[in-house]
Image (spheres, rainbow, N blue to C red):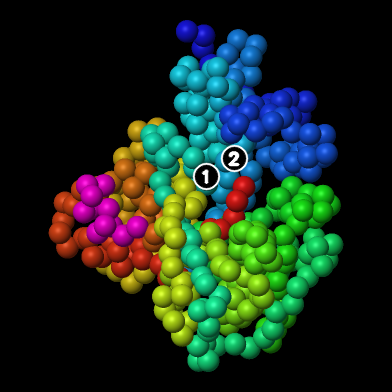
């Protein structure tokens, strides 16, 4: 079998790599017009190519970003995307070579954490990736979904012209800051490739912006999809970010008040956002799905563990096993003051994949232990671990990349 050669591509090879990734997703090659925008994001960070002989067989790219942690700090994160293997080159170690080299490169460039939006959960789990944030999809019937008068409100909502949104949305999103664990940075390159491109092509969805006492403090992006004959539509909410409860409620009130709408659907919302509790009729909001959102891979475990804040719990020694990056395999003393490697005996042991699920508080140690993902060596340690790692509000990402 031909050996897989993985290396960083130069700029002249990046469009071909992008087309390999699109082909793996059953999409046509990128057009010149699309590439003019996509290239900007594609050249923001290294792109890896896997070669079998002279043939480019697979690719993945790393986008420098930042991840919000419990405690309100942000840690550097390598967001990996554009991953794909040619259909006629699968089963030859290409994906494995790309994953291993991307982890090595992320560590070399100083990223404690890697983030992914995962298609093949079993594939990524093999390399230590775990579900870092979750989201839920909700459906609401506007005729029944009336907000209770007690729901807080202190601003108004306006529709923003597409051209104005090019400058406004990046400033607004950045101004929200790390308002939830799991929120990730959106670079100027991201906004150009993901949003400006739609606006320039005349395909941008509608943008609603909430303005509170201190200025703009939230936004919702939505599209109207015809659900049958006649003027009535389904409103698909594709991007929704607001830090204050008043802004969240104000945007929901606006979305549910739009005329001629049969249903409002929001695919990615925080799992602890109590939309039902805002309504006079609790059952006017239905959870359509509960999904994994951002998957995490802890690359530099000492740095990643020490970066986040911890709750009020007794000091705990956790043993971590990392078969892919064995330098991470160690015992770690974790307390409200921080985390560091230790020679003390562990009270709990788990894989680096399971730790990624608990890192932002998304999965409790008790839940992971109940399914065999945590080995409990000291029964008193499990409640303390959940006090240390628990986080509120719930972790949420809500960014596609």
On the image, the x and y values in percent for residue 39 come to 76, 38
Relative vertical location of residue 148 with respect to residue 106 in this rendering, above or below: below
The question of residue 96 being in magenta is answered with no
On the image, the x and y values in percent for residue 140 come to 51, 70
Element class at badge 1 = strand
Identified at 62% across, 70% down, the residue is: 261
Relative vertical location of residue 82 with respect to residue 57 in this rendering, above or below: below
* Residues at circles 2 and 1 in contact by the CB criterion of under 8 Å: yes
Give the camera-side residue of 57 and 68: 57
Q: Of the numbered discs in the image, which one, if any, rests on residue 244?
A: none
Left or right? Give the position of 3 relative to 218: left
Q: Which residue is mark 1?
A: 116
Q: CA distance from mark 2 to mark 1?
A: 7 Å
On the image, the x and y values in percent for residue 61 come to 62, 36
Q: Is residue 385 visible?
A: yes
Identified at 16% across, 51% down, the residue is: 377
Identified at 71% across, 50% down, the residue is: 194
Element class at badge 2 = strand
> Image quadrant of residue 178?
bottom right
Left or right? Give the position of 30 relative to 265: right
Give the camera-side residue of 70 and 25: 25
Q: Earlier in the sequence, mark 2 or mark 1?
A: 2
Q: Residues within 10 Å of mark 2 (few under 14, many from 20)?
A: many
Bounds of the magenta segment: 363-373
On the image, the x and y values in percent for residue 278 come to 48, 81
Q: Of the numbered discs in the image, which one, if any, rests on residue 81?
A: 2
> Image quadrant of residue 286?
bottom left
Q: Is residue 337 visible?
A: no
The question of residue 371 being in magenta is answered with yes
Give the camera-side residue of 143 and 34: 143
Left or right? Give the position of 78 relative to 297: right
């Amino acid at each position: 079998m031909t050996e897989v050669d993985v290396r960083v591509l130069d700029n002249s090879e990046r469009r071909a790599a992008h087309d390999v990734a699109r082909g793996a997703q059953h999409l046509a090659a990128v057009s010149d017009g699309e590439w003019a925008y996509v290239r900007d994001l594609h050249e923001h960070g290294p792109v890896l190519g896997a070669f079998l002989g002279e043939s480019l067989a697979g690719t993945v790219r790393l986008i420098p970003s930042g991840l919000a942690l419990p405690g309100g700090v942000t840690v550097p994160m390598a967001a990996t995307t554009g991953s794909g293997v040619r259909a006629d080159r699968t089963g030859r170690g290409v994906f494995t070579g790309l994953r291993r080299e991307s982890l090595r490169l992320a560590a070399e460039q100083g990223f404690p954490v890697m983030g992914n939006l995962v298609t093949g959960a079993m594939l990524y789990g093999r390399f230590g990736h775990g579900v870092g944030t979750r989201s839920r999809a909700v459906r609401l019937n506007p005729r029944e979904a009336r907000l209770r008068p007690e729901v807080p409100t202190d601003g108004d909502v306006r529709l923003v012209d597409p051209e104005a949104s090019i400058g406004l949305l990046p400033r607004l999103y950045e101004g929200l800051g790390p308002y939830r664990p799991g929120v990730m940075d959106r670079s100027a390159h991201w906004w150009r490739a993901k949003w400006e491109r739609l606006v320039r092509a005349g395909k941008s969805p509608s943008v609603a912006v909430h303005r509170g006492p201190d200025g703009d403090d939230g936004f919702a992006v939505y599209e109207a999809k015809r659900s049958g004959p006649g003027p009535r539509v389904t409103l698909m909410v594709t991007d929704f970010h607001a830090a204050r409860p008043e802004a969240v409620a104000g945007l929901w009130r606006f979305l549910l008040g739009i005329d001629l709408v049969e249903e409002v659907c929001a695919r990615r919302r925080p799992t602890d956002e109590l939309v039902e509790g805002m309504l006079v009729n609790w059952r006017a909001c239905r959870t359509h799905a509960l999904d994994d959102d951002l998957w995490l891979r802890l690359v530099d475990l000492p740095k990643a563990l020490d970066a986040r804040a911890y709750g009020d719990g007794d000091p705990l020694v956790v043993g971590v096993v990392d078969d892919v990056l064995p330098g991470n395999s160690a015992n770690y003393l974790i307390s409200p003051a921080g985390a560091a490697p230790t020679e003390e005996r562990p009270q709990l042991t788990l894989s680096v994949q399971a730790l990624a699920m608990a890192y932002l508080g998304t999965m409790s140690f008790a839940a992971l232990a109940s399914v065999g993902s945590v080995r409990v060596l000291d029964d008193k340690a499990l409640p303390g671990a959940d006090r240390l790692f628990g986080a509120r509000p719930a972790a949420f990402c809500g960014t596609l990349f």
